[in-house]
Image (tube, grey):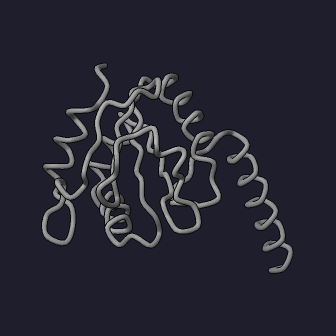
């Protein structure tokens, strides 16, 4: 019985995963295998449909501050909720496996990671943000982060 349940669960996960990927889901982690240009195209379509801006989060799994920001956002639900209500979040990998140099060459030089670019719903660059300015000690500052997000959110 346990084996049948596990088999059904496994097939369900495979089905749901393939459906999500086929539906144009964006990456939730930094993935060197992703096509950044294709993901941006998907993000632009999603942003236009939902009247949101796009937040490009550039970094990698190797980056401690990238991991800190990712978990900090999950823990700070009011910041995460504001982000999700006003932005399409797109993670762009930068790592030895894939530096996405061609893709990132269209944006200003990145001084350190993680780095955030704010784009309009049509993909036009609005702002380049050094995330160090949003830090507080060994984490991020909720007030600074919310001020930043509110400043660059789309007018609704």
Left or right position of 152 against 133: right
Q: Quadrant of the C terminus?
A: top left
Image quadrant assignment for residue 149: top left
Q: Relative to the observer, which residue lies in front, 130 or 155?
A: 130
Looking at the picture, how far across and down is residue 107, in whole percent? 40, 40
Please state if 35 lies on the left or on the right of 9 as rendered: left
How many badges with numbers are in the image? 0
From what the image shows, is residue 23 above or below residue 52? below
Q: In which quadrant will I find the N terminus?
A: bottom right
* Location of residue 94 with respect to 120 vertically, above or below: below
The one nearer the camera, 155 or 2, is 155
Could you tell whether 98 is left or right of 83 in the image?
A: right
Q: Please, which residue is most extreme toward the bottom here?
A: 2
Residue drawn at x 50%, y 65% is 95
Q: Position of residue 100 (x, y in %)?
A: 54, 53
- Nearest the viewer among 44 and 107 is 107
State the residue in front, 24 or 35.
35
Q: Quadrant of residue 32?
A: bottom right
Residue 124 drawn at (x, y percent): 41, 26
- Residue visible at 42% across and 23% down? 51
Question: Relative to 54, is 3 above or below?
Answer: below
The percent position of residue 122, horizontal first and vertical second, equals 47, 23
Which residue is depicted at the point 69% across and 39% down?
23
């Amino acid at each position: 019985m346990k084996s049948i349940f596990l088999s059904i669960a496994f097939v369900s996960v495979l089905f749901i995963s393939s459906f999500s990927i086929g539906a144009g889901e964006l990456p939730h982690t930094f993935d060197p295998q992703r096509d950044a240009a294709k993901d941006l195209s998907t993000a632009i379509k999603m942003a236009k449909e939902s009247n949101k801006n796009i937040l490009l989060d550039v970094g990698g799994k190797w980056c401690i501050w990238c991991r800190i920001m990712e978990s900090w956002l999950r823990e700070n639900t009011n910041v995460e909720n504001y982000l999700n209500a006003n932005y399409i979040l797109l993670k762009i990998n930068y790592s030895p496996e894939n530096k996405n140099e061609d893709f990132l060459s269209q944006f200003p030089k990145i001084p350190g990671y993680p780095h955030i670019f704010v784009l309009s719903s049509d993909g036009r660059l609005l702002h380049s943000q050094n995330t160090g300015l949003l830090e507080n000690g060994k984490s991020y500052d909720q007030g600074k982060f919310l001020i930043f997000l509110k400043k660059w959110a789309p007018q609704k």
